[in-house]
Amino acid sequence: MSGMSVVDWDSAVREAREATGFRGEVTGRTIAAVRAEVRADRREEFDSELGALGGGGAFEAFLDHWWTQALADAANDEEAREHVIEFADLAIALRVRAEGGPTHTADAVEQMITGPAS
């Protein structure tokens, strides 16, 4: 896990669990752990994206996305999926904050993705 220590990541996961009440299993945030948990029909896409990566922020964004996807793939139903995504989003935000990275509101992130509202 790049510049973040395991203790810091564990703290982010623990804090996200407390805030969201999520009690499910948490896949490790490593390439091997995430690849093992992603649905089989998504592994080719995972491998292709991994092979095309550079370093730095792109790698972290890739790992964040696929870690969340692996957790969501394991959810039993839509409600569980929404809950695990809420947990994963918060854990990632806490990781980014601990690393001194930028923090954005949900609205700001949505605008970055979709562009300004008309």
Image (cartoon, rainbow, N blue to C red):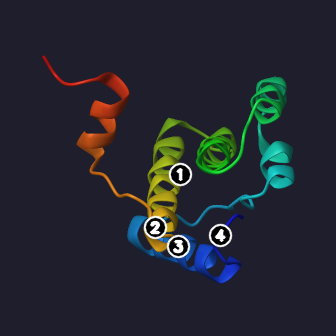
Q: Is residue 104 above or below residue 46?
A: below
Question: Mark 2 to mark 4: distance in Å?
Answer: 14 Å
Question: Mark 3 to mark 1: distance in Å?
Answer: 15 Å
In this rendering, position of residue 43 left or right of residue 57? right
Cβ–Cβ under 8 Å for marks 3 and 4: no
- Which residue lies at the image location 61% right of the left edge and 73% below the top edge? 9
Q: Position of residue 59 (x, y in %)?
A: 67, 46
Q: Amino acid at mark 4?
A: Gly
Cβ–Cβ under 8 Å for marks 2 and 1: no
- Residue 84: mark in rendering: 1
Instruction: Find the residue positioned furthest to the bottom.
Output: 7
- Residue 3: mark in rendering: 4
Q: Is residue 72 above or below residue 30?
A: above
Q: Secondary structure at mark 2?
A: helix
Label 1 crowd bin: few (<14), some (14–19), many (20+), radius 10 Å: many
Q: Quadrant of the N terminus?
A: bottom right
Q: Amino acid at mark 1?
A: Val
Instruction: Find disc 3 in the rendering and name its residue.
Output: 12
For the residues carrying marks 2 and 1, which lies nearer the camera in this image?
2
In this rendering, position of residue 52 left or right of residue 15? right
- Which residue lies at the image location 59% right of the left edge and 49% below the top edge? 57
